[in-house]
Amino acid sequence: MHGVCAPPTDLRGPGCDPPRRSEGPQAFVATLASMIRPARARAIRRLPLAVALAAGLAGALAGCAPSGVEPSPTTSAPSETPAPPPEFFPEGTAEENLPYFEYVLDGFAAGVEPVEGRPVVDAVAAAGFDRAAMQVSFDRTQTNLVADSIFVSVRIGADCLLGQVVAADRSVSAMTAPAVGPEQSLCLIGNTRPIDW
């Protein structure tokens, strides 16, 4: 009977000769048993080692995790302070008062008053502008349709503050322009509504 040898590393390569059946059934079984017992012994010896390695690795990983560390509280960013409203300059120029004029019209548009000449003029006058220096467009067109926009102006010296409030979406636009006319006393050209209230 041949001696026991290690199995080949490559199943397709050369190795030790398998036990020959010609040597008898008992010898064949004994040879197989002698090959299986060392392999089982090696597997049994390796099992505690594998368990120990796994336990050690788990302990090492647990040791790497921070213990007792609490997340730092997050601080919310301070809210921005709203910008102060523009300043009104009673003795200022049209250019200096443009931001305040637009601010007044924006405030009117944000309200619920109808987009008509009278409430627009009243809002501008209540903000400090001279009613006698204002002009305003009509609420209706020459064909008796509701006007798409209301135009309002304030003359300050030789210049004008011009404002528009759109009826559909209550959007506002404002600008300055030189006064026109023979005496440079007009800001809106054409027929305008008398401010007689």
Image (cartoon, rainbow, N blue to C red):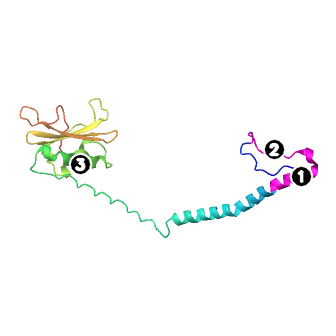
Which residue is depicted at the point 78% across and 45% down?
Answer: 16
Position of 147 with respect to 176 (left or right) is right
Look at mark 2 in the image and give the residue it sits on. Answer: 17
Residue 195 % position (x, y): 18, 42
The mark closer to the camera, 3 or 1, is 1
Dot 2: what SS?
Answer: loop
Q: CA separation, marks 3 and 1?
A: 105 Å
Tell me which amino acid carries mark 1.
Answer: Val
- Residue bounds of the magenta highlight: 11-36
Does the stretch in magenta take in 55?
no
The mark closer to the camera, 2 or 1, is 2
Q: Please tell me which residue lies in front, 78 or 43.
A: 43
Dot 1: what SS?
Answer: helix
Q: Disc 3, disc 1: CB below 8 Å?
A: no
Look at mark 1 in the image and give the residue it sits on. Answer: 29
Mark seen at residue 95? none
Categorize mark 1 by other alpha carbons within 10 Å: few (<14), some (14-19), many (20+). Answer: few
The mark that comes first in sequence, 2 or 1, is 2
Which residue is depicted at the point 27% across and 49% down?
Answer: 107
The mark that comes first in sequence, 2 or 3, is 2
The mark that comes first in sequence, 3 or 1, is 1
Which residue is depicted at the point 85% across and 52% down?
Answer: 32
Q: Is residue 140 visible?
A: yes
Q: CA separation, marks 2 and 1?
A: 15 Å
Look at mark 3 in the image and give the residue it sits on. Answer: 103
Tell me which amino acid carries mark 3.
Answer: Tyr
Which residue is depicted at the point 28% across and 37% down?
Answer: 149
